[in-house]
Amino acid sequence: MTLLASRARGGIVAGINPVAKLGVSALIAIPLILTLDIVSAAVALLLECVLFLFVGIGWREFWVRTWPVWLAAPLTGVTIALYGETSGPLFFEWFVVRISEGSLELALATMFRVLAIALPSVVLFVTVDPTDLADGLAQIVRLPARFVLGALAGLRMVGLFLDDWRALELARRARGVADRGRIRRLLGMVFALLVLSIRRGAKLATAMEARGFGASGRRTWARPSTFGFREWMLLLIGAGISAIAITAAVITGAWNPIFGPSV
């Protein structure tokens, strides 16, 4: 059972190699990390919303998957507005809280920046199957097979950890040791889960070694991972989003690089 949904989706982006989705997320995020301005982040977010229409997820699933991002972005903006760098007219001051025109602009830019960086990573990876991602990282990116397969095996265990937690909770309740002391009960369950995880990890490592996962020589793959025209087009779209966002910021004079002089 996979950690992410593996059901078939109808979006154009859904069937693209996960390596390309990882690459387009990086192409969009890296330029936005290097600057802190409203224009580049807002333009990138607007163009990303157009891309999201072709991912193949419904609006309900979109909000369910991305609500932590929509919650974290305003909270980050509020923090910057209250405690950020003060510049321009001062609107409110109390103790260490200073709200100024500059801090409000910085807060708004930070909020849009968080949304523009985080949303593509969340939305694009909704349609990614962990096994497909592992195949792409090993066959296309040429990452070490032992590292990729070990990470995939660990990712597959997350669902079992949740089942173990529920089983431990029911077992302790049946024995009457879960009635009092929430913190004590939590620490006991965490320790029990840690013991189960170590035992399962040791068994899994032994089973993988027995099946030749640690053998030297060239490895064969059951499912070839290809990188073709659609993948390159997605990367080109990501580069185009970044280029348009940066160009808009430079033309409007809003470009505010973190390193180096601003335009």
Image (tube, rainbow, N blue to C red):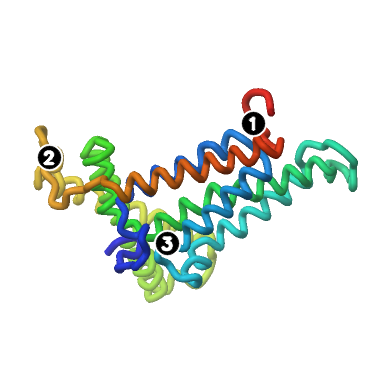
Q: Residue at x 42, y 55 (%)?
A: 124
Q: Residue at x 53, y 69 (%)?
A: 180
Q: Please name the residue shown 53% across and 50% down the image.
A: 118
Element marked by disc 2:
loop
Q: Are marks 1 and 2 in contact (CB under 8 Å)?
A: no
Whether label 3 touches label 2, CB < 8 Å: no
The label on residue 54 is 3
Residue type beneath disc 1: Pro
**Dot 1 corresponds to which residue?**
257
**Which residue type does callout 2 highlight?**
Arg
Nearest to viewer (mark 1 / mark 3): 3
Please tell me the numbered disc located at residue 2. none
Alpha carbon of mark 3 to alpha carbon of mark 2: how far? Answer: 35 Å
Tag on residue 219?
Answer: 2
Alpha carbon of mark 1 to alpha carbon of mark 2: how far? Answer: 44 Å
Q: Closer to the N terminus: mark 1 or mark 3?
A: 3
